[in-house]
């Protein structure tokens, strides 16, 4: 019954989304405020309806209602409770429903908290959101309905793909989708501004928080996905340049560019046309990612099912929204007046440089991801574009950008002083140089490139902190005064600092694990031990273990230091999920400080158990850095200027002030 | 087509789910320098039955065969280039994760540079054009009112 209720709610949501797409738009066109006002309640009710549909599907999973095709295909009565819930979106249909739920959620947020948006802008934004929601609800209802019934109902389900039976599924997709879909708001604002043919600094002030929130979620989502792959896939890699990863990296890169160009637009009303284009491109890349993953053009663990009808449908959505928005852009962009002038060496100039490199990096990933498809389409040949290509192109593109990062916040608006900025970055420069030199001479196996990489990480971190120190006047005024000033700084400054310092932490982690990790591949007999980078690992025994829905062979290892200290036990196992008969490898990981010992086991051979042991120095910094970046995003979001409602209050206060004088 | 579907199905089952890194202890060459070259080469070769995995990462049977094959060639004295040529002649260019520099892939390799240079030029000309329309110098009246404002400030 609740399943039919959910299905019905979804159909109703589609009807409301159509109303939301049309009525406010018409209202804005003919200047009818009553029509424009329809947008708000309809959007909020639409969100409520999609929530009901989503809750109905979760309930079906909780009850293991195998009369629902989707539940039967992806669940099992013996599955642990958490995975029954997260399994809801661990499949194509359910994940699309989550996509639409988040889209409706963002729409409702704009409707509920955008009180001081100009009415026509708000009406247009909600209409564009409604249009996107309509397209995806149609897609779900016609090609990917999660509420289909099965008659007669099977006794038992087919279980969830074992790889997905992990806490990662509870965190990674929701965060990723909050990012992907969050960019829809920036997109809707851009399209609304183009429809209106009007946009000012206030527009950027409204767009920035949404972009910032989406970006922060996407950062967290990608980092979580990376860590999940790291511990689940069992060979200790953190980034594979898999097309599906690229699909999430592209909106992140474009979103990062958007975040920065929106600053220029808000502060200096320059780069307007470019910012609008970036807002369109960023969400277009999110849509493209959804298409690439969901259509099965690229088959991987992420595309749960492949069905040509779905691919064609999403492709149509893609063409409609990207094509439509870009056409509108081509027609209307010229009407947006160019804004403030600036010298190439200035904060604006630095942000243009940032955008140039980020956009090129995005395009490189895009071309690398699509090129094999292109070659296959126009000829009979098949080629592969994999990690070695991206490492050779993306990294050289990203390095100059990383070197330039600390300069940005230190340059003045309009016309900056590069020599002065460099002088103020002296401390960061020497710290980075010292790190590189110390790294080169003190760390075994450290090549010159690796040492420079470590220096680059320190350059970013100390450079970011330098900005804080300068802004609080540390060194010029007393420590107490500086501290007081520091606490008085706008939160967005801390956001910038954390964003850039987090990037530095990730760089440190990536460089150190890529250049300095150690690997041992060997066969071990019980009792045998081996040494790796100053640690000892002793294989103790292999024992069977039975979990709730799997059986496994657990290998127990004792970890210790060469000097004899004990670090406890590491358990690594080969697991067999009984329902699907699928094997997985569960890596054994011991975190020591910021580094990790990583053990995965292979087959039992006559000479012993195949064991692979890695020492991964500072590997956790990769994800800690991403979390710091994410925190920077949210702290910046709490800045008073960006809080919803601030512009109106300030304007009211200013008016009151004028009236008094 | 059926072959492709089969590959994809195998990829899902073997490639991703198989997990655990690939190189087996019995494959490792005695000569560390040769083994290092073998490891490097195997990160550039695709496991044909997996999803975007190199043979270095995959524990599929076919990946193992390829790893052993390339080590045999190295031991026989082939250069890296000769090993790759040999494997490409048997498996096609699809096996290379780093596409070759050739006419067909020219666009792929040139794109990053073209975009960076093109974008840079675009930004540069925008600066130049905007530079021409830089604000006109202040008129005498404006100069005067500016002086007044500054005087008030003091």
Image: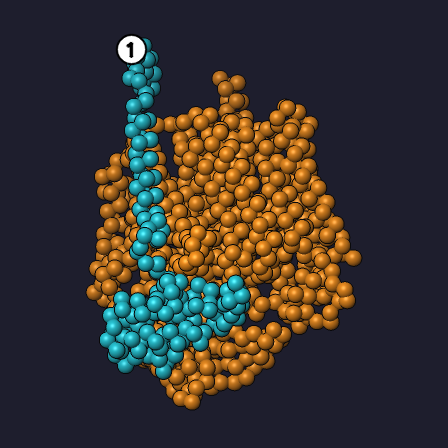
Chain colours: A orange, B cyan
At a point 36% along the width and 51% down the height, the residue shown is B108
Give the residue at the far right of this rendering. Answer: A1
- Badge 1: how crowded within 10 Å, few (<14), some, or many (20+)? few
At a point 61% along the width and 26% down the height, the residue shown is A29
Residue A510 sits above or below residue A543 on the image: above
Comparing A147 with B89, the one in front is B89
Residue A289 visible here: yes
Residue B41 visible here: no
Label 1 marks a residue whose chain is B
Q: Is residue A91 left or right of residue B21?
A: right
Find residue A361 and report its horizontal and vertical position in percent: 37, 48
Number of numbered labels in the structure image? 1
Q: In this view, does A133 lie to the left or right of B12?
A: right
Comparing A318 with A508, the one in front is A318
Instruction: Read off the residue under disc 1.
Output: B140
Find residue A149 and report its horizontal and vertical position in percent: 74, 60
């Amino acid at each position: 019954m609740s399943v039919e209720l959910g299905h019905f709610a979804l159909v109703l949501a589609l009807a409301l989304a159509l109303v939301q797409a049309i009525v406010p738009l018409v209202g804005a066109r003919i200047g009818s405020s009553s029509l424009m006002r329809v947008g708000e309640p309809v959007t909020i009710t639409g969100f409520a309806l999609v929530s009901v549909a989503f809750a109905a599907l979760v309930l079906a999973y909780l009850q293991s209602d195998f009369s629902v095709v989707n539940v039967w295909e992806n669940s099992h009565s013996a599955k642990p409770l958490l995975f029954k819930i997260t399994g809801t979106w661990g499949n194509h249909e359910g994940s699309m429903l989550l996509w639409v739920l988040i889209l409706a959620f963002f729409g409702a947020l704009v409707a509920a908290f955008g009180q001081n948006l100009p009415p026509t802008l708000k009406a247009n934004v909600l209409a564009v959101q409604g249009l996107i929601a309509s397209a995806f609800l149609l897609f779900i209802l016609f090609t990917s309905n999660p509420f289909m019934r099965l008659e007669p109902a099977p006794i038992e389900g087919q279980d969830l793909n074992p790889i997905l039976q992990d806490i990662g599924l509870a965190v990674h997709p929701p965060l990723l989708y909050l990012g992907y879909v969050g960019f829809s708001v920036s997109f809707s604002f851009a399209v609304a501004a183009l429809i209106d043919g009007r946009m000012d600094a206030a527009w950027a002030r409204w767009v920035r928080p949404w972009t910032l929130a989406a970006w922060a979620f996407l950062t967290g989502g990608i980092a979580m996905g990376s860590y999940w792959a790291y511990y689940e896939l069992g060979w200790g890699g953190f980034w594979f340049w898999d097309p599906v990863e690229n699909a999430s990296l592209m909106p992140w890169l474009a979103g990062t560019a958007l975040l920065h160009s929106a600053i220029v637009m808000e502060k200096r009303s320059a780069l307007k046309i470019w910012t609008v284009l970036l807002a369109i491109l960023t969400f277009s890349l999110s849509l493209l990612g959804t298409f690439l993953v969901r259509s099965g053009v690229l088959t991987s663990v992420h595309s749960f099912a492949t069905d040509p009808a779905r691919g064609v449908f999403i492709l149509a959505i893609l063409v409609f929204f990207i094509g439509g928005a870009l056409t509108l852009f081509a027609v209307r962009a010229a009407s947006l007046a160019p804004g403030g002038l600036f010298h190439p060496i200035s904060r604006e100039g630095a942000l243009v440089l940032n955008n140039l490199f980020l956009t090129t990096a995005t395009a490189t990933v895009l071309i690398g991801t699509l090129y094999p498809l292109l070659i296959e389409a126009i000829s009979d040949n098949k080629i592969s574009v994999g990690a070695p290509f991206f490492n050779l192109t993306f990294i050289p593109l990203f390095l100059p950008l990383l070197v330039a990062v600390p300069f940005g916040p230190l340059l003045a608006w309009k016309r900056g002083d590069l020599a002065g900025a460099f002088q103020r970055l002296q401390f960061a420069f020497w710290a980075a140089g010292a790190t590189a030199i110390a790294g080169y001479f003190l760390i075994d196996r450290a090549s010159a490139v690796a040492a420079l990489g470590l220096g680059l990480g320190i350059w970013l971190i100390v450079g970011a902190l330098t900005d804080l120190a300068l802004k609080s006047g540390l060194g010029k005024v007393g420590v107490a005064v500086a501290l007081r000033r520091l606490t008085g700084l706008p939160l967005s400054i801390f956001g910038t600092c954390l964003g850039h310092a987090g990037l530095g932490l990730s760089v440190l982690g990536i460089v150190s694990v890529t250049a300095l990790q150690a690997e041992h591949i060997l066969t071990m007999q019980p009792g045998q031990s081996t040494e790796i980078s100053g640690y000892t690992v002793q294989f103790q025994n292999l024992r069977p273990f039975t979990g709730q829905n799997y059986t496994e062979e657990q290998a127990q290892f004792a970890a210790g230091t060469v000097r004899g200290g004990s670090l406890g036990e590491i358990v690594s196992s080969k697991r067999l999920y009984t329902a699907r008969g699928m094997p997985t490898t569960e890596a054994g990981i011991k975190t020591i400080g910021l580094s990790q010992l990583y053990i995965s086991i292979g087959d039992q051979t006559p000479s012993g158990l195949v064991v692979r042991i890695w020492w991964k120095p500072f590997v956790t910094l990769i994800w800690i850095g991403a979390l710091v970046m994410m925190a920077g995003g949210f702290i910046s979001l709490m800045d008073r200027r960006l809080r919803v409602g601030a512009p109106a209050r300030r304007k009211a206060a200013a008016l009151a002030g004028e009236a008094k004088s | 087509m059926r072959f492709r579907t089969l590959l994809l199905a195998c990829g899902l089952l073997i490639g991703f789910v198989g997990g655990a890194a690939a190189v087996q202890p019995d494959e490792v060459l005695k000569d560390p320098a040769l083994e290092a070259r073998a490891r490097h080469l195997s990160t550039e070769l695709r496991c044909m039955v997996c999803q975007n995995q190199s043979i270095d990462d995959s524990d599929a049977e076919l990946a193992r065969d390829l790893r052993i094959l390339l080590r045999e060639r190295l031991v026989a004295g082939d250069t890296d280039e000769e090993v790759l040529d040999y494997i490409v002649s048997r498996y096609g260019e699809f096996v290379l994760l780093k596409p070759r520099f050739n006419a067909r892939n020219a666009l792929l390799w040139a794109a990053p540079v073209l975009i960076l240079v093109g974008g840079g030029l675009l930004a540069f000309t925008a600066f130049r054009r905007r530079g021409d329309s830089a604000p006109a110098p202040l008129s005498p009246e404006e100069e005067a009112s500016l002086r007044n404002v500054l005087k008030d400030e003091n």
